[in-house]
Amino acid sequence: MSQSRYDQKREFETTPEPPAEHITSDVDPLTAPVGDQFVIQQHHATALHHDVRLEMVNDEDTPVLVSWAVPKGLPRRRGDRHLAIHTEDHPMAYATFSGTIPEGEYGGGVVRIFDRGTYEMVGRGDDRITFRLDGERLAGVWHLVHTGPREGKDQWLAIMSEDLRPPGDEPPPADPMLATLTADAFDDPEWVFEPKWDGIRAIAICTDHTRLISRNDRDISVAYPELRRLHDRVVALDATLDGEIVAFEEGIPSFQRLQQRMHLRNERRIEQMAQQIPVAYIVFDLLYIDGRDLTGWPLQERRKKLEEVIVPSEQVQLSPVTEGDGVALFQAAGQQGLEGIMAKRSSSGYKPGARSGDWLKIKVVFDADVVVVGWTEGEGQRVGTLGSLVMAVYDGEDLRYVGNVGTGFNRDSLADALDRLRGLEGKDPPFPAEVLRSRPELLPAHWVSPSLVIRVEHRQLTSAGRLRAPSFQGFREDKAPRDCTWDHLTSEAGLSRS
């Protein structure tokens, strides 16, 4: 028996794909008897595409999967036309194949099942087939129109005729669930634990493009071009993800490194910095998929679904989780220089915009978002430049002094800070006279309007209301000064471990 085109292209000692049996030649999709199964596979090969496969029967009365590679996937809007390349017939065993074809092999890359179900052949003519799909994701009618060979490929056009999907749920708001600070790590089989990522929280809305929405509801997609195809790494029609944008330094998340990216808006500069300081999106929750709102699902079920639909890459990674063992993970986080860990109740739903006791954060090092109200000039090696930033938070309508920060800067961040401070000069100090009398280092300060927010790391909030050993981490544009409050600072930093 001669080998089929399918077998000729593959080395089955290397690839996990199933071999073809009883396939000697490819069928004519315009005339072959039809079956009732279909499968669509999302194929991350040299270029991402969908493989659309319809069951038909060959001359040996053997069911086969007649296949088209569709670079943009089947159209999802009526009248849209997508190129489809007719490829070799695949064995029926391929209908359940999901895995990784080794690099260097034909079609090397990750294969995931995008959809499967039954289909009906609605009609066939001299140059087209029309079929109805009833799948787990897709429901509708499509045409495949044969346009003939071109550049050695058998080309067709895929056209949507009718979308039969039922209306979906309303997507949840792009407002992330927040965690409550707790002092001590713990073990509990009803909880899962994961690293706390020191980056920018972002909701990713994935359709046929990706939108990244920050905590203050700003679209920050343009700042991170390496994440613009994030939706390609999701096996879904549409999805809403929760995660963190992170820049790494020697394998450790670095907010300082990331802040060199977060404020850029010039396209050329953004592209340059994307090469120098690449970011990754660490995804840890799935809120919405294929028209279904998952926020009411238990976390353990959302996580299971998330693992099914994310195809990890250098730019898109799943946050690793461990069940029950929070103490060991907290100790490892400290040893590896991480900010801390997150604890999440396995049975909990997702509460957009709410701070919940179902999510806890346990910190190795604390951080705080504070308002810049002034600055002092440098001394010694920093003469002529910035010495420190004067920090405050809102206590009701008043600004409350919480200390100065002069460490954590490098030459570039010092210059950037001074550039931001220029033009913000204020005339009067924002603090009462008794504060100034008790803090003589504030007397020569240059006061500025309270419009800049910075993040600092620190060891604790002292009984006098000062941040101990603060270190500058970067400016934040995703948080308003009025959101930096004394109540929030004390709730976040006021705990101490026994």
Image (tube, helix red, strand yellow):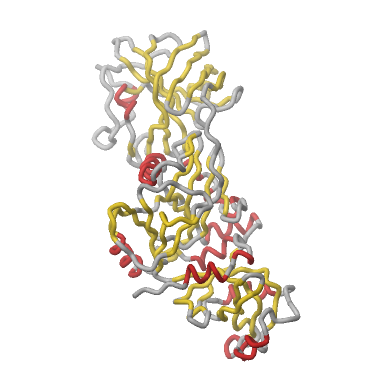
> Which one is in front, 189 or 396?
396
* Relative vertical location of residue 311 with respect to residue 137 in this rendering, above or below: below
In the shown orientation, is residue 191 left or right of residue 206?
left
Q: Quadrant of residue 301?
A: top left
Residue at coordinates 60% horizontally, 89% vertically from top-left?
439
Residue 479 percent location from the top left of the image: 60, 62
> Which one is in front, 34 or 293?
293
In the shown orientation, is residue 136 left or right of residue 431?
left
In the shown orientation, is residue 335 left or right of residue 339?
left
Residue at coordinates 34% horizontally, 37% vertically from top-left?
105
Residue 316 percent location from the top left of the image: 45, 49
Residue 463 percent location from the top left of the image: 48, 81
> Which one is in front, 287 or 397?
397
Residue 355 percent location from the top left of the image: 49, 56
Residue at coordinates 28% horizontally, 63% vertically from top-left?
328
Q: Is residue 375 among what the camera can see?
A: yes
Quadrant, the N terminus: top left
> Which one is in front, 17 or 207?
207
* Relative vertical location of residue 467 with respect to residue 222 in this rendering, above or below: below
Q: Quadrant of residue 438?
A: bottom right
Q: Is residue 469 among what the camera can see?
A: no
In the shown orientation, is residue 180 left or right of residue 374?
left
- Which residue is at the far front? 396
